[in-house]
Amino acid sequence: AHDQECNCVAINEGAGAVVTASSDGTAKVWDARSGQVRMELRGASQPIKSVDMNGQIVVAASDDRTCSIWSMDTGRLRHTCRGHAGKIYSVRLASQGRIFTGSTDRSIKLWNTTDGRCTRTWSCTSTCNALAFEEAAGMLASAHQDGAVRLWDVRAQSARPVAEVTTAHSAPVTSAMFDPCSGKQLLTNSRDNSLCLIDMRGSFEPVASLRASGYTVPYNWSAACFSPDGQ
């Protein structure tokens, strides 16, 4: 599939497509039914650590400090987003042509898919390893190297998070995902070899910690996820 290890995967059921991205600097779009490669996307010069798609575009975050935007129709590179001072570990697409990226430069940036320009920056106090976005609430969750999960209301003008969850994990948090059915819980994964469920209904407190014998989290971009039915 790839010349080097595959670091991330994204699925779009509506488009019947799966996209994978690798340390070889490429992303590939696969037909979910046949398992055949639809297109190979090039543009990153270093390993890709995060990828997302929405049926029209594919976005990828790379160690080369850029975020690439490709057309799913043609496979052509539309824009290369530049502005981070460190490696980009996470990228998430949102409605209204928005892209969120999180970086080792301790910042989160908002980009426009139309022209690839940065429209807003939030400063963090720690490397951002992962992002998750809940459309209905306008809530962005960021997972950090210092073991904290920070929650941002992207509709507000404040540059500060609305909450910081520091009791969920004792080591770097490597992924975050909202419950796809209700958005009422956030699932996190950590280098402390545990998963955590965080209540998003106002308390922002951990409600469950999940561990299993032999479960280890080896990388700062290792991810856990809900199934489509929220299980």
Image (spheres, helix red, strand yellow):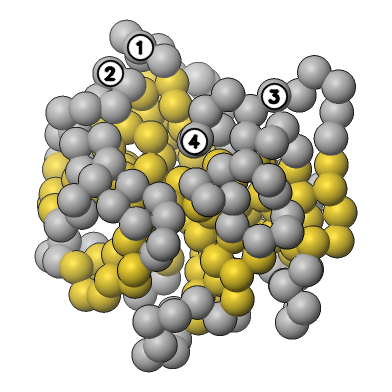
Q: Secondary structure at mark 2?
A: loop
The residue lying at 73 percent from left, 55 percent from top is: 168
Residue 39 in the image: x percent, y percent?
29, 27
Q: Quadrant of residue 120?
A: bottom left
| Picture residue at 37% right of the left edge, 29% below the top | 21
**Distance from the alpha carbon under mark 4 to that under mark 2:** 16 Å
- Is disc 4 in contact with disc 1, using a CB cutoff of under 8 Å? no
Between circles 1 and 3, the one closer to the viewer is 3
Instruction: Looking at the image, tell me whether mark 4 or mark 3 is earlier in sequence order.
Output: 3
- Report how far apart the C-alphas of labels 2 and 1 lie in the structure: 5 Å
Instruction: From the image, tell me which residue sits under label 1.
Output: 4
* Separation of residues labelled 3 and 2 (CA atoms): 24 Å
Question: How many angstroms separate mark 4 from mark 3 (CA)?
Answer: 13 Å
Marks 4 and 3 close (CB-CB < 8 Å): no
Residue at which label 2 appears: 24
The residue drawn where x is 50% and y is 35% is 220
The quarter holding residue 199 reads bottom right
Disc 1 crowd rating (10 Å Cα; few below 14, some 14-19, many 20+) is few
Residue under pointer 3: 216
Kind of residue at badge 1 = Gln
The disc labelled 2 sits on which kind of residue?
Answer: Asp
Around disc 2, counting alpha carbons within 10 Å, would you say few (fewer than 14), some (14 to 19), or many (20 or more)? some
In this view of the protein, which residue sits in the foreground, 102 or 3? 102
| Of the two numbered discs 4 and 2 in the rendering, the one whose residue sits closer to the viewer | 4
N-term mark: 4 or 2: 2
In this orientation, which residue lies closer to the viewer: 84 or 52? 84
Which numbered tag is attached to residue 221?
4
Q: Could you tell which of marks 4 and 1 lies nearer the N-terminus?
A: 1
Q: Earlier in the sequence, mark 1 or mark 3?
A: 1
Question: Is residue 60 visible in this depiction of the protein?
Answer: yes
The amino acid marked with disc number 4 is: Trp
Q: Give yes or no for contact between labels 2 and 1 (Cβ–Cβ under 8 Å).
A: yes
